[in-house]
Amino acid sequence: MAKETFASRRGFIMASVGAAVGLGNAMRFPGLCAKYGGGAFLIIYVLALAVLGVPLLNAEIAAGRKFKGGAPVCFRGLSKKSEAVGWAACVNSAITAVVYAGLAAWILSEALSMGSVCALPREKAGEYFFSEILKSGSDGVIRGISPLVLLSSAAVWAVMLFCLSGGAKRLSAAAKFTVIIPMIFLVALAARGLFYDNSAAALSALFMPDFSALSSPEIWINALGQVFFSLSLAVGIMPAYGSYLPEKTNVFTSSVIIASADAVVSIIASVALFTTLYGCGLQSSVGDSGMITAFSVYPSAISSLFGRGSPLNAAAGTAFYLSLAMMAVQSGVSMLEALASPLAGKFASRKKIAAVMCAAGFAAGAVYCTTAGDVVMEISDIFVNFYNVILLALAECLLFGRRKNARVLVPEINRYTKRAKMPPAFFGISIGVFCPVILATLGASEIFKLALGGTGYPPWAETAFGWGLSAAVLAAGFLFRRASDRIR
């Protein structure tokens, strides 16, 4: 039983926005817009956000408040047999936190190196991180470790430990910095981009729909999938935050605010990326790989943001990457909270749980500080933060979409609402029909691609950091359930 609560509805919303808004908003979303017809992708995304994202977000938050616990407690409350899925979602979230912490360490290292990056020719600036800082190789073999990235990783995990050990109040307090400050820098970068001569062309490329793209199934699958990943659904975060929710909070309007804020950040980040790259003559470099955008494309653009040789470039770059690091840290802390919440009080105190999780995370994340870091990052992110989330989201929707469970969740969503309410029929169709069909289609599509071409990485690395991690998540779900049963 969770005893903590957010101090206010505002604190809950800030923490939830911080959990939802992450590097995917700032890096992957703009790339998807560029790849799939600009405004056409935005239209589908906003539609999917309203039809699919908002109902599922409402359901997760309402379940957390209803059953006063994280995902395992919520899942058990709806169906005893499904508790293992709740634990698996939380374990998967914790592993994803290690990935986010690794990215945060990379980003912090880039921020500390902005002086050197901006002194290089533009074509070299985009190679600096992987060639000079990480010294990565494409074979996944560990040949050394980067002292700068390791120190950055230690700093990241220290901050995450501080935030995690303080519970709900510290999570909401930290979000004031990790949400507001990155937003200020994103808005500033977008504003700077509007002063380029070809900013109109950049905005046209972003917002003008290419309606011919709507006929491609791929754009629909990616836009719909982005909704699930962008809102941090099916990873155990929102049920945990819902369990800390003040009793009389309006769940429905809070969910709409969180989803809207997430979409606004994605659009502002897209404006910043498009105008900056167009202004620097790098519009052809826009792609859907967040890693390439963050560590190759943006450094090249920032090195000439205010003209070659300007000291403002390094200052702006440092500020920008520090803001990205804040977003990554907030996402990582939220992911850890998904597991810390159900563990705290059941197996040990929160502070002990936080210390063990962060120590283990730092040790496991050391691999991202090595020359094999980029290969391991790509593989673990694909399997843990993509394939696993699809499977877990499908299981969650099948559970929430049952008629008897919908009868429990919808009234909880609509408690304390005055005007805007969740229509029961709409909830049933969205969660019980649309979401499972879309997730099953997305999963089948990805399995087909994987069967045809594989991941392109060494088989041993794919097995260890891909299939192995996925299997470990599922096994951990059942082990935690059995341990919980014994304690109960």
Image (cartoon, rainbow, N blue to C red):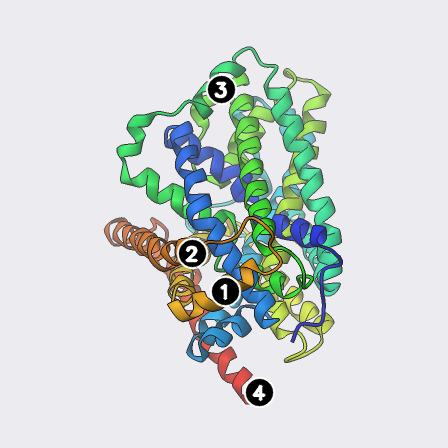
Q: Which residue is mark 2?
A: 427
Q: CA distance from mark 3 to mark 1?
A: 43 Å
User: For residue 133, which quarter of the picture?
Assistant: top right
Which one is nearer the viewer's eye here, 476 or 393? 393
Taking the image as shown, residue 196 lies to the left or right of residue 214, namely right
Mark sitting earlier along the chain (4/1): 1
Tell me whether circle 4 and circle 1 mark residues in contact (CB < 8 Å): no
Mark sitting earlier along the chain (2/3): 3
Mark sitting earlier along the chain (4/3): 3
Residue 21 in sight:
no
Q: CA distance from mark 1 to mark 2?
A: 10 Å
Tag nearer the camera, 3 or 1: 1
Circle 1 sits in a helix, a strand or a loop, which is it? Answer: helix
Q: Which residue is mark 4?
A: 488
Tell me whether circle 2 and circle 4 mark residues in contact (CB < 8 Å): no
Location of the C terminus (image quadrant): bottom right
| Amino acid identity at mark 1 | Leu
Taking the image as shown, residue 320 lies to the left or right of residue 444, namely right
Image coords of residue 199 (percent x, y): 53, 16
| Amino acid identity at mark 2 | Phe
Checking the image for residue 202, the label placed there is 3
Which one is nearer the viewer's eye here, 106 or 389? 389
Q: CA distance from mark 4 to mark 1?
A: 25 Å
Checking the image for residue 72, the label placed there is none
Circle 3 sits in a helix, a strand or a loop, which is it? Answer: helix
Identify whether 243 is placed above or below 32. below
Q: Residues within 10 Å of mark 4 (few under 14, many from 20)?
A: few
Identify whether 226 is placed above or below 385. above
Q: Which residue is mark 1?
A: 409
Tell me whether circle 1 and circle 2 mark residues in contact (CB < 8 Å): yes
| Amino acid identity at mark 4 | Arg
Identify whether 246 is placed above or below 138. below
